[in-house]
Image: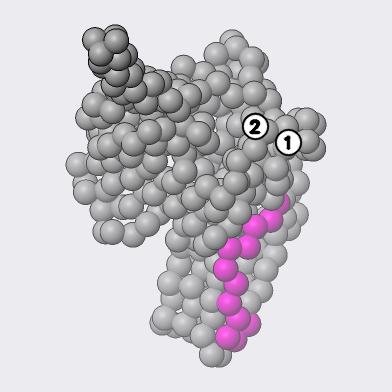
Amino acid sequence: MTKVTTFGMIMIILIMPLSGCSSITSGITGSSANEEILVPSWEIGDYWLYTFSTPDYSDDTTKLVVATTDIEEDGTAYMLAISSIGEARRHAVLNHNPFLGRITHDQLSPFENGIAQPVLDFPLTKNKAWSFDLFGNEWNAVVSSIDSSIASIRATANDGSSIDYIFDGNLAFFSSFIWTDSEGIIQLKMKNADQGVGHTGDVYFVRGGDLYSNSWYNSGPDAEFVDTFLVNDHPKDGEWDEMIYFLDASCGGGSTISLTLRDHFSVSALERFWGPGAEETGTLGTIPYPSEDYTLTVTFTGDTHLRILLAGGITYSWNL
């Protein structure tokens, strides 16, 4: 009896560690020394709620929603849309959210300039390294740590810029994504606030294209600025539905700004005036279908600042 009892106790001791290793989070394989996170699979209606902060605005809440799973890129990419048409337009003119639009199935890669960029490289394992292009820069990424379903990744560029991001396997997407430029200024901060499935309602994606941008600081005598620009169709998708503008303006005491945008028929498409002490930040608006060329006239008196961004937009929508 003693030998039988001893053998039974040894078997219990051997089995206990093995049972502890079997409770692994879905998407994670291997032991703590060589964990890996596999690419998740998304379904229509899956969504993630994020707060976005940029130098242009702070703490804007946006819901990203999977609109399609088997249409884009010959069925190899998702379409990640947004629940607000206003936010879709903001992205089209500011291009601040790289994760709107097509996202590949195999690596959850966003597209920049028509090319899928591997911001992630599944399976994610500790110390894995790769490179990608984003925000007009080339990045070298490495997985600094993996803890259960969470991978911490840091990407750096030659100019000193960095992106620090965390992929959470339980969310099946990022829990945070922070891009800091070479001067230490945060250009984009994404923080996850919620996640779920089965979103219903209309979702949008606005395919944008830069048309014009300029910024003026005037602290001297009165000045007038006149510029013209040509509006061509989208190179792939044809005519724009609308022109989207983004404005920042400020006037000191006794200062003024006037802005007029006219089409080639000399019809005024946009007129704005700011008086002494006026300030306006982050104004978003639209102009009906743009014509071939425009003339922009801006006049300044006194201490003033004006920035304007213009983009063409083609709107896509889905009802889920």
Question: SS for tag 1?
Answer: loop
User: Which residue does the numbered mark 2 point to in the structure image?
Assistant: 46
Three-letter code, disc 2: Asp
- Quarter of the image for residue 318 reads top right
Residue that protrudes farthest toward the front in the picture: 1
Please report contact status of discs 2 and 1: CB closer than 8 Å, yes or no.
yes
Residue neighbourhood size for the residue with mark 1, other residues' Cα within 10 Å, grouped as few (<14), some (14–19), many (≥20): many
Which residue is drawn at the image coordinates 58% and 77% (left, top)?
279
132 displayed left or right of 245: left
- Quarter of the image for residue 201 reads top right
Q: Which comes sooner in the sequence, label 2 or label 1?
A: 2
Q: Give the magenta-colored segment's residue range.
A: 275-286
Residue closer to the observer: 27 or 154: 27
Magenta: main secondary structure equals strand
Could you tell me residue 86's position as x and y percent?
69, 50
Q: In the rendered image, which quarter contains the N terminus?
A: top left
60 displayed left or right of 272: left
| Residue 55 visible in the picture | yes
| Residue 11 visible in the picture | no
Three-letter code, disc 1: His
Residue closer to the observer: 7 or 312: 7
Question: SS for tag 2?
Answer: loop
Could you tell me residue 308's position as x and y percent?
54, 59
53 displayed left or right of 273: left
Could you tell me residue 186's position as x and y percent?
37, 57
Residue closer to the observer: 225 or 24: 24
User: Which residue does the numbered mark 1 point to in the structure image?
Assistant: 199
Residue closer to the observer: 209 or 75: 75
Could you tell me residue 240's position as x and y percent?
68, 35
Q: Residue 270: say if magenta.
A: no
On screen, 138 above or below 24? below
Give the alpha-carbon distance from disc 2 to disc 1, as whole Å: 6 Å
